[in-house]
Image (cartoon, rainbow, N blue to C red):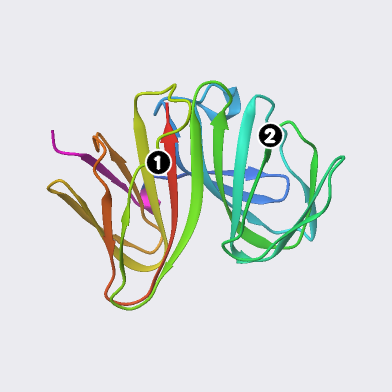
Amino acid sequence: MQPNFTVLGPSCRVVSEWAGGKTAQLAIAPPDALYQSRDFLWRLSSATVELDQSDFTPLPGYTRLISVLEGEMQLFPEGGSPVFLAPFELYSFDGATPILSKGRCTDFNLMLRKGGCEGSLQSCRMGPGGSLLCTPAVPSPLRFSRCTTAVYCVGGSVSVSAGGAAARLESGVLLLAEELGGLPLGLSCREEAALMIAQIWF
């Protein structure tokens, strides 16, 4: 079976206001789920933080993974130590934890429903003529049978291929790769490229 590639550009996004700026929903599962109803399995989004100080929206029942795409962010989780995030650094936390944020930036978020899915998030920077293979990482213990790999092009452009399926991503475009059947994704670029790569098992 050939892998299924879905390419989602800026016109596919749902943009909403939050207390500190705007959030662009890049993808959500299932597709008819609503973030406001908290009935989604997982969600990818990118938010602008336009205030010097703001509070994260509480998300009980979800695990959150966050990174900074532009600017810098300092997080103050209740009961924990401060966390400083420079561009492409990652932080994972319980969505129910109250967190104060300081700093203006553009961030990248992966939200995962506890017990319903598992996932990972990584950043990747590729130099001119760079290439790599992204192999699905199987969660342990294996509780889920399906996997979606999401590749978001932060800057530059990148070619993605697997088992006869292929796509080219420009800056600001997201690819959802499904039905990979264990096949790795091949990534290559002519110039430089910056990526965020998420793997979600459900």
* The quadrant where residue 16 appears: top right
Which numbered mark, 1 or 2, is in the foreground of this view?
1
Q: Is residue 3 magenta?
A: yes
Q: Is residue 131 above or below residue 57?
A: below
The spot of residue 79 in percent (x, y) is: 87, 40
**Mark number, residue 137:** 1
* The quadrant where residue 85 appears: bottom right
Q: Is residue 159 above or below residue 142?
A: below
* The quadrant where residue 31 appears: top left
Q: Which residue is mark 2?
A: 95
- Kind of residue indicated by mark 1: Ala
Look at the numbered disc 2 and give the secondary structure of its residue.
loop
The residue sitting at 82% across, 54% down in the picture is 82
Which quarter shows the N terminus?
Answer: top left
- Which is nearer the N-term, disc 1 or disc 2? 2
The spot of residue 67 in percent (x, y) is: 59, 54
Query: Looking at this view, is 138 or 55 the one in front?
Result: 138
- Residue extending farthest right: 79
Query: Looking at this view, is 17 or 97 the one in front?
Result: 97
Look at the numbered disc 1 and give the secondary structure of its residue.
loop
Q: Is residue 140 magenta?
A: no
**Real-space Cα distance between discs 1 and 2?**
23 Å
- Kind of residue indicated by mark 2: Gly
**Mark number, residue 16:** none
Range covered by the magenta-colored residues: 1-11
Q: Is residue 80 above or below residue 161?
A: above
The residue sitting at 36% across, 33% down in the picture is 147
Report crowding for label 1: few under 14, some 14 to 19, many 20 or more residues within 10 A (C-alpha): some
